[in-house]
Image (cartoon, helix red, strand yellow):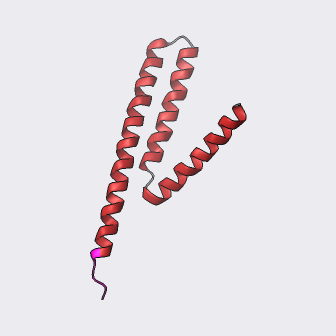
């Protein structure tokens, strides 16, 4: 089962990289920050530092929210850019 999870994680990473190439790398970087916060939270919970673990979980939620906001903004700006290019008269 862990092999399927590993494969799905790999496919998800490839899709994130393709999305980053198309729309921008901001959401990808926020996702990496969320993964880093999650790793810190897990380590803190294992080491019985509950307060730091809770702060890490709050960081994961904040980074995830910022990532989704960045995705929406990147898609909107890309569509606006394409509309401007279509409206531009060719010489």
- Magenta-drawn stretch contains 63: no
Depth order, front residue of 38/4: 4
Quarter of the image containing the C terminus? bottom left
Quarter of the image containing the N terminus? top right
* Numbered disc total: 0
Q: Is residue 23 above or below residue 11?
A: below
Percent coordinates x, y for residue 38 in the rendering: 51, 28
Magenta-highlighted residues: 87-91
Residue sitting at x 44%, y 41% = 30
Percent coordinates x, y for residue 2 in the rendering: 70, 31
Residue sitting at x 33%, y 51% = 73
Residue sitting at x 55%, y 22% = 42
Q: Image quarter for residue 46?
A: top right
Q: Image quarter for residue 48?
A: top right
Percent coordinates x, y for residue 50 in the rendering: 48, 12
Q: Is residue 70 above or below residue 43?
A: below
Overall secondary structure of the magenta section = loop
- Drawn side of residue 14 relative to residue 63, left or right: right
Q: Is residue 65 above or below residue 12?
A: above
In the displayed orientation, state which residue is furthest to the top: 48
Residue sitting at x 37%, y 46% = 70
Percent coordinates x, y for residue 66 in the rendering: 37, 39
- Magenta-drawn stretch contains 90: yes
């Amino acid at each position: 089962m862990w092999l399927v999870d590993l494969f799905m994680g790999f496919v998800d990473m490839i899709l994130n990289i393709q999305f980053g190439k198309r729309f921008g790398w901001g959401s990808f970087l926020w996702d990496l920050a969320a993964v880093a916060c999650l790793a810190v939270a897990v380590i803190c919970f294992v080491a019985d530092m509950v307060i730091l673990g809770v702060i890490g979980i709050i960081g994961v939620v904040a980074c995830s929210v910022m990532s989704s906001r960045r995705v929406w903004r990147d898609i909107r700006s890309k569509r606006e850019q394409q509309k401007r290019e279509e409206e531009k008269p060719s010489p």
